């Protein structure tokens, strides 16, 4: 099946099931204008994150990797009343774009974009007792995925859902000899998830306008 068909199905699903939102559309537009890489989740994936947050009744969400705030807005709009979303971003320019997009969506009071290396910020969150979070979405540099996931578990409770994006890599994840650091980061992530007794986990392959990739999803089943 061709990528053209994958894209057509994504467009069909988006037009039929993903309600147009001017704030989300503007977030994508302004991210492109600012020169951010077009690596945000697709509209159906964004709605999936939104639905998962609502299924969780999420009051506290952690996002690792803000980019322009597109996925942030999807999840932030699903927060339970009084809920908070904390998004971690290492790039100052990305954070500035995201904050403007989040403000336009009316989510500034519920969403905080914190600048800094997440591998430095996440340990601080643990020591500060900021967690546990109900939903954690990891979509940042792939070589660091194993460490992000380990800290995510520390910031979780029984029932927390942890989602990691871009874990299939056009199928390259099966290549143990790959020299791609992102592929090796995902493979190590899978090993960490498999060994972590506090979670049950799986990976779902996806196709569409983001190409051939997938999500890993872990459910924390023990404190």
Image: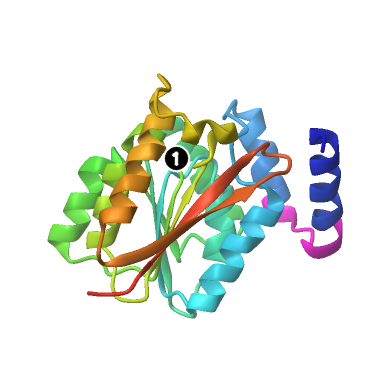
Position in image of residue 156 (x %, y %): 29, 67
Q: Is residue 91 visible?
A: no
Tell me where residue 115 sits by quadrant.
top left
Q: Residue at x 52, y 44 (%)?
A: 98
Identify which residue, 97 or 59, lies in the foreground: 59
Judge left or right: residue 153 versus residue 88: left
Position in image of residue 147 (x %, y %): 26, 44
Q: Residue at x 58, y 29 (%)?
A: 37
Judge left or right: residue 141 versus residue 25: left
Q: Residue at x 36, y 34 (%)?
A: 185
Read off the residue under disc 1: 95
For disc 1, the neighbor class at 10 Å (few under 14, some 14 to 19, many from 20) is many
72 versus 33 height, above or below: below
Identify which residue, 105 or 160, lies in the foreground: 160
Q: Is residue 206 visible?
A: yes
Q: How is the image coloured?
A: rainbow
């Amino acid at each position: 099946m061709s990528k053209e068909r994958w894209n057509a199905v994504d467009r069909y699903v988006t037009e039929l099931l993903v309600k147009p939102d001017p704030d989300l559309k503007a977030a994508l537009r302004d991210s492109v204008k600012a020169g951010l890489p077009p690596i945000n989740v697709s509209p159906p994936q964004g709605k999936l994150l939104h639905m998962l947050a609502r299924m969780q009744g999420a009051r506290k969400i952690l996002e690792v990797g803000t980019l322009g705030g597109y996925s942030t807005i999807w999840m932030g709009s699903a927060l339970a009343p009084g809920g908070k979303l904390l998004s971690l971003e290492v790039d100052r320019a990305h954070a500035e774009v995201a904050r403007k997009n989040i403000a336009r969506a009316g989510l500034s009071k519920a969403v905080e974009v914190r600048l800094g290396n997440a591998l430095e910020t996440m340990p601080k969150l643990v020591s500060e007792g900021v967690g546990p979070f109900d939903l954690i979405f990891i979509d940042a540099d792939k070589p660091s995925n194993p460490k992000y996931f380990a800290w995510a578990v520390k910031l979780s409770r029984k029932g927390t859902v942890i989602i990691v994006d871009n874990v299939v890599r056009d199928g390259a994840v099966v290549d143990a000899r790959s020299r791609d650091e992102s592929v090796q980061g995902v493979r190590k992530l899978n090993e960490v998830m498999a060994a972590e007794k506090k979670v049950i986990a799986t990976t779902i392959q996806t196709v569409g306008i983001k190409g051939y990739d997938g999500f890993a999803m872990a459910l924390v089943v023990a404190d």
